[in-house]
Amino acid sequence: MKNKTEVVIVGIGLAALATAARLYELGKRDIAIYTESYGGTPYIAAINFVLPENPYGDTPEQYFKDMMNAGYQLNDAALVKEMTDNTLNGYELLKRWGVKFAKNEDGSTKLRHVSGHTFPRSLCCTTELIGVEIVETMVKALKEKGIKIVMDAQCVNLLSDGKKVYGVTIKTEDGLSNVYADNVVAAWGGVGNLFGKSTYPQDIKGNTLAIAHNAGAKLVDIEFLEYEPMVVLSPEGAVGEPCPTAMLGEGAHLLNTDGERFMLKVRPEGEAGSPKTLINKEIWKQVDAGKGTEHRGAWVDLRHISRDVLKAYPWFFDRLMDNGVDPNLELVEVGPMAHSFSGGIWVDGNYESSLEGFFAVGEACGGVHGACRCAGNAASQATLSGLLCAEGVNKLSRNNNGIEASIDYKVDEEVFNKYVPKVRELAVDALGIYRKGELLKAALTELQNIEAQDDLKNDTEASQIVESVRLMVQAALTREESRGTHMRIDFPESSDEFKRKIIL
Ligand SMILES: Cc1cc2nc3c(=O)[nH]c(=O)nc-3n(C[C@H](O)[C@H](O)[C@H](O)COP(=O)(O)OP(=O)(O)OC[C@H]3O[C@@H](n4cnc5c(N)ncnc54)[C@H](O)[C@@H]3O)c2cc1C
């Protein structure tokens, strides 16, 4: 069979890198990575692992409890247990492939305290973003081992018979081609660019939700979109840069326009370690009460934090300084922005989806974080899901049995421009930080009307974007409660009566 590979991985973010690295260690050599670019990974500042030498008495059991609490107990407990039990294996995998983490002066690993965690367990790099260190080190090492990496290659479709996936359609500047595989691993990240402003880079288009669903894969938890609470809202040149929640652990305060530390009303012990959902809600309340900043946010006060500490977050510090804001002299305007996705493709303990031979890792899969994820845990989950998926692929030995298919993909720029901007607006309105039944219903009707238009079929990517947003709206409408990041104005806080997964 022409153009067949044992394992095709779509994407080259952390989840893909961990999958490929572990597959290589397990003896697999016929691996090909197809990717648009590097996704959210180069922006990762914090990654959590429980290390045996930690001075806090931290344990994988405590980590498990923290994840379940942050996730409002809606997480898939078996996936969380496997992830937290293997935390050290994830750390060691990255170290074996050359990733270096920041150390304290005494030689111990530097651990930061980020939101949602009982103990400091967030590892970092203090000279650049740890995500940059991971990409540079691991891509180089994988290339040296001879792993095939095709950049600027977009997966536009999965080849599926509804029960099994046997390849992908790839678009490059040379055109479209089908690549057949025994195993396809979706490591294509989240959904950020279905929305207007977000912290995501441009290569995360979000149409991948529909690509998986159309192939027949089940999706889970897709109503849960994370808003990063402290993203810079001004000046223009720094908009979209997250102020790390680890800054709260360094002593940062949040202030409303009356100068009040409003978080203390709900968290008298201080801002450090607050769950992101709580920070989001409290900022929103200040905006609602007319005490928000010009761009609907709050102020973060970093003025009293030592310059050396601020400089240990160089990407953040430099971006502010380059845009004329000295955080030791001025308050910084921050607020919530769409940032990462807790839902995605439903997977089992091998990270295989409901379709045979189709696996999903990192932000592409759902179920681990439940209704809200702990800070720094997207990176840990990307590492661990990659490691465990590679072991699943190795164990299951799937075979595509030589099935082939024709290419099915259409492009019509006019159709794209006719529908996609409107659909992105609908996504922002209906799937914001606070959601309303009426708005969701109206958005669903409008999206269904768009889906019924004949010309939509003339642009595959546009129809995938419309479907992806419609699926998220449908899930958000179905969850008639407020839980975690899904806050429904028309329904109260969650009670156990509503505790169930929404699977589409
Ligand atoms: C600004 C920012 C800061 C963040 N900070 C942190 C942090 O400090 N800690 C943390 O835990 N998380 C953080 N996150 C979230 C984190 O970056 C992601 O959750 C993480 O990168 C997910 O890893 P991944 O490998 O699953 O996906 P990604 O790193 O997003 O990689 C996805 C890959 O798939 C490729 N791709 C996408 N679609 C296609 C397609 N159709 N065809 C081919 N290739 C495709 C992309 O080009 C990319 O290579 C941050 C995110 C952002 C945007």
Image (cartoon, rainbow, N blue to C red):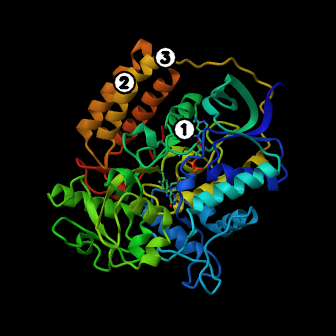
| Front position among marks 2 and 3 | 3
| Front position among marks 3 and 1 | 3
Image vertical order of residue 444 relative to residue 17, above or below? above
Which is more N-terminal, label 3 or label 2?
Answer: 3
**Camera-side residue: 417 or 355?**
417
**Camera-side residue: 243 or 312?**
312
Q: Is residue 115 visible?
A: no
Q: Position of residue 50 (x, y in %)?
A: 60, 73
CB under 8 Å between discs 3 and 1: no
**Camera-side residue: 71 or 501?**
71
Q: Position of residue 431 (x, y in %)?
A: 34, 42
Q: Which mark is residue 412?
A: 3
The CB of the residue at mark 3 lies under 8 Å from ligand 1: no
| Front position among marks 1 and 2 | 2
Image vertical order of residue 356 relative to residue 174, above or below? below
Q: Position of residue 407 (x, y in %)?
A: 66, 19
Image vertical order of residue 400 relative to residue 64, above or below? above
Quarter of the picture containing the N terminus is top right
For label 2, the residue is 448
Q: Which mark is residue 218?
A: 1
**Camera-side residue: 6 or 241?**
241
Left or right: 360 in relation to 445:
right
Q: Within 10 angstroms of label 3, few (less than 14), some, or many (20 or more) residues? A: some
Q: Within 10 angstroms of label 1, few (less than 14), some, or many (20 or more) residues? A: some
Q: Amino acid at mark 2?
A: Gln
Q: CA distance from mark 1 to mark 2?
A: 20 Å
Q: Is residue 27 visible?
A: yes
Label 3: which secondary element: loop
Q: Position of residue 370 (x, y in %)?
A: 47, 55
Left or right: 469 in relation to 349:
left
Residue 83: image quadrant is bottom right
Label 1: which secondary element: loop
